[in-house]
Structure formats: C-alpha cells, structure tokens
Amino acid sequence: MRLFLAALILVHLVGLVTAGAALLARQRTPEGAVAWLLALLAIPWIAVPAYWVFGRFRFDGYRTARGAGDSPLHEAIEGLAEAVEPWRLPAPADPSDPASGLRAVERLVRMPFLRGNDARLLVDGPAIFDALHRGIDEAEHYLLVQFYTIRDDETGRELARRLIRKAEEGIRVHLIYDRIGSYGLSSRWVRELEDAGVEVRRFESNRRRPGRFQINFRNHRKVLVADGRKGWLGGVNLANEYLHGDSTLGPWRDTHMELEGPAVLGLQLSFLEDWYWTCSEVLQLDWTPTPSPVADRIALVLPSGPADEVETASLLVQHAIHSARSRIWISSPYFVPDEAVTSALELAAFRGVDVRIIVPRRSDYWLVDMARFAFKERLLEAGVRIEAWEPGFHHGKSILVDDQATSVGTVNFDNRSFRLNFEITGLVVDEAFALRVARMFEADFARCTPFTLEEVAARPRWFRAAARAAHLFSPLL
C-alpha cells in the first residue's frame, strides 16, 4: 500500500512539473495550454506520457537557416537574396497603398514578393497529375520531389517509373517522404528508386535526437521542382484516392498550383532546408532567377512550421482575413480554427465582407467533423456562409481575398497546420489569376449545400454536447 501511495505521489509530482513546462511553452494557444494543464493535473498517469509524445510545439534541432550565419545553408540563402533583388517589388511610398500589406507577409517568410512569374491553377486529380508527370518528363538537370503521403499503389508506382526513367537518363532526382504520412510505404518501392540512382530521404522529426519524443511533428508539404524554374505545390499526395476517389468518401476534389519564374526559388529553398535536416547535405542547385516568358505575376512561396519563431501559418491566415474588403472565400477539408482565426472571420463578416467557407459534408476524421460542428453556430450567427461540399471529399486548401490575392497550398484551418506541421503555401497577387480562382470557387459553390442555423438547432442535444466535447480537444487535433 505504501509503495502504491508513493508511486501515486510521484506520478502527480511529475504531472505538476510537466504542467509547468506546458504552461511555459511557446507557440501554444491559451485553449491548448488549459487543456494540457487540466489533463496533466487530473490524470497524470495518462496525460504525462501523452504530453511527452504529442505535447511539444517546438521542433528541437531543426534549423530553418534563414538569417543563421553559422548554418551551412547560409551561403545559399545569402546568394538567393542577392540574385532575386532585381525582381523585388519597390517599397510603396504611401502606407495606404494596398501593396504595403504585402510587407507583413514578407517579414513572416523573410523572402520578398517577386515579379516575373506565371501561375496556373490545377483542379482535380487528372489535371494535377498530368501536370506533375509533364514536369518530371521535361526536367533537364534535376528534380526535387516531396510528398507527405506516398503509397505503393498504382499512382505511386506510376510516379516511381517516371522518376526512375529520369534518373537513368542522368537527371539528378532527390525525393523526400514523411515517415508518418507514408507509414506502410513498402521498402521495395524505395529500393527500386535507390537502385536506379534516385536519392531518397525519409523525413522524421527525431532523426538527430532519437531519444526526443517529437513524433507529433510531420512534414505535410507536397512539392515538385524542376530545374529551379518550374514548381508545383498544393493538396495532392501520391495515392490512388487523389486520382480515382475514395471507396467510402466518394470522388476526391483537390487543388494544386503550377509556378514558373523567380518565385520557384522559394519553393526550392524550402526543399533544400528539409533535405538538409534529413541528411546534413547541402544540395548543389541552380539559384539563377528565370522569369516566365508569358506572364509577369507577383508571387511568393511561404513555408511554415514548428521551427519558426512565430506562428507563421496562423498569422498568414489572420492577415488575409483582416485584409479582406469585399470578400474572402476559403476551402479547407479540416476546419477547426483557433480563437484568433474564428474572431477574425466574425469581424470580417461584421464589416460586410462576403465570407464563405467550403468544407466537406463528411471528412475522413470523425473527431474533426464533430469539433467543426461546434464552430458552425457561432460563425453562422455572425453572417459567415459555411458551404457543405456534397459530391464527395473536398481536400482543396485555397483562399481568395477580394479580386487580387490568392493562396493555394497545404495549410488546413486547424491547430495541426497552424502549429505542428511543416506546410507550404503559394501566394499570387494578380487580378487575372484571382479571376480564375474565383471561377473555381463559384463552380464549387454550385455543388455545395449551405449549412443553416435551423440545421444546427435541429440536432439532438446529445449530438451538440458531443460536438462541444470534441471542441475542447480542438487545440490538440
């Protein structure tokens, strides 16, 4: 009995100490801190090991290298900043100039918006994979390939065949996949690429410190770069459902973007940093800005993740919402925003901004669906329109601000994308491209059914209580 009491006291002491660490942790929402504190103090025998595995919000050991003079990547970063200088936007003389709002985004990423780019919107699997395959086939010097999820299925094997063919042609091919997102990827798939000369690296958060519990961090980026001149980023992974749909959820709706021009170097820089983390190697790449021969759009690639000094993804989203004057249209498959983003959406609706959000009627994570329901009533009452995608699963992650600014990338409206995952976003400031994105949204709205306050009120009490309970876990999702 004494031994049991001693163990119980020790567990609670450890819970108390861990609660102190959780309270002092940076980059944590107040809601998340309270959730962890209550759990660590009330049920430490469960919460303490859970916190060691899932509770970290800082990626120890990862160096983004931007501005870090002691990093082996510093030379490449400095050279890139000098090379893109002719393509930078001039500083606006008038603070009321809409272009002044771009400076806040530039400070987030420590890279400038650049001219001389073309951007092409890619909608749904067939168009997206056609573009990816074309980009691979046309590469002349090197390919940088990165996906969160790769499966040894028809889609994954097709891409592998193309990469192997390029490697056999003498093209350098570098591939990164995430350990957790690609869990179950066969060693045979990897070995066949390596035997052909493809350099394959697995991204794992505790690679350099095996004893550190950091498995909650994931690299959610989906990137392809060809020769430093063209790049692709967006929502699709290398798996059959992204091309052929899911047997349970139905057809798969997704969005990607193709970039050409100096902004692609930002995409290349993000890959370089991730590659350096996996193997401490600085790849020799072409950092010469090559403008698009067909367009002069303003663009910027913004990486974000748990190694950043600030909450880059969340701040970007908040800035976009606060900047909107006439409309902000959003699509996100996992919509569980934090308090700051929720309040920003409410304020935008109160200002008279047309705020519309596309979410799937049903996603592949039931807890996210439940937590999302708890936000609906509050946002609907503020005048936000929440549109339920009906035909299948909407996995696209896009934002349209007014008639000018757009983003396409990998960031979801949830705590994981805002604070735990390494993500990537392509930003384009261009009226013609914004018009194309607006037409995509309008076509999607036509296939949605708006959620209503009456629908929320009609739910039984037990369901609404369950949604509130799931909402309590939203900072941990």
Image (tube, helix red, strand yellow):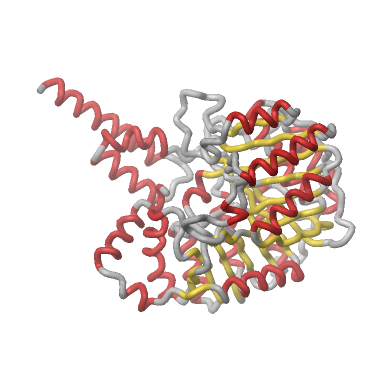
User: Is residue 435 or residue 194 the one in the foreground?
Assistant: 194
List x then y, in percent, for residue 353.
56, 76
Q: Quadrant of residue 140?
A: top right
Name the residue located 43 percent from the left edge and 40 percent from the top edge: 25
User: Is residue 163 or residue 317 the one in the foreground?
Assistant: 163
Name the residue located 51 percent from the left edge and 57 percent from the top edge: 413
Quarter of the figure with the N terminus? top left
**Left or right for 232, reference 60:** right
List x then y, in percent, for residue 450.
47, 75
Circle count: 0
List x then y, in percent, for residue 68.
67, 34
List x then y, in percent, for residue 215.
47, 34
Q: Is residue 304 in view?
A: no
Name the residue located 38 percent from the left edge and 54 percent from the top edge: 367
Q: Is residue 171 in view?
A: yes
Q: Residue lying furthest right in this view?
A: 293
**Above or below, 18 relative to 138:** above
User: Is residue 322 or residue 409 the one in the foreground?
Assistant: 409
**Above or below, 92 relative to 69:** below
